[in-house]
Image: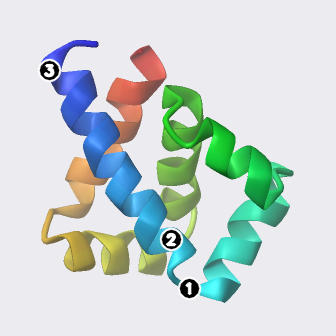
Amino acid sequence: MAALETNAAALALQALAWTLGDSHRASRLLDLTGLDPASLRARAGEPSLLAATLGFLEAHEPDLIACAEALDVKPAALVAARMALERA
């Protein structure tokens, strides 16, 4: 995995952890992806799942902004990470 993809994956994993830290948001993610908790755990490192998580945040701008603030990054960094993971 290239350095950009590694950084994108690390950022996306942080965003996934942040997403799962709120039960309502976690339930929405599971409902929208069709995953169950066991599948999510098993696939957490896959670029496609990480990109989907970031896309989930992008689809609801308040979540994207809140996540970016919590991770101390710009929202655009999360968007760029999704794009990098989609190319992986």
Question: How far apart, in angstroms, are the residues tagged by discs 1 and 3?
Answer: 30 Å
The answer to whether mark 2 and mark 1 are in CB contact below 8 A is yes
How far apart marks 2 and 3 lie (CA) works out to 24 Å
Left or right of 19, for residue 37:
right
x and y, in percent, of residue 64 in the image = 40, 69
User: Which numbered dot is residue 3?
Assistant: 3
Residue 4 position by quadrant: top left
Residue to which mark 2 is pinned: 19
Residue 38 sits above or below residue 68 on the image: above
Q: Which comes before the other along the chain, label 2 or label 3?
A: 3
Relative to 24, 12 lies left or right: left
Tag 2: Cα neighbours inside 10 Å, few (<14), some, or many (≥20)? many
Label 1 SS: loop
> Which residue lies under the disc numbered 1?
22
In the image, taking residue 8 as reference, residue 86 lies left or right, namely right
Please provide percent x and percent y for residue 78. 30, 51
Q: Residue at x 64, y 49 (%)?
A: 41
Q: Residue at x 76, y 45 (%)?
A: 39
Q: Residues within 10 Å of mark 3 (few under 14, many from 20)?
A: few
Residue type beneath disc 2: Thr
Badge 1: residue crowd in 10 Å (few <14, some 14–19, many ≥20): few
Amino acid type, callout 1: Asp
| Picture residue at 25% right of the left edge, 79% below the top | 70
Q: Decide which of 33, 45 is in the foreground and name it.
A: 45
For mark 2, give the secondary structure.
helix
**Residue 66 versus residue 38 in the image, above or below:** below
Residue 40 vs 2, above or below: the answer is below
The type of residue carrying mark 3 is Ala
In 3D space, how far apart are the residues under numbered discs 2 and 1 (Cα atoms)? 6 Å
Residue 40 in percent (x, y) is at 68, 49
Residue drawn 83% across and 56% down? Answer: 36
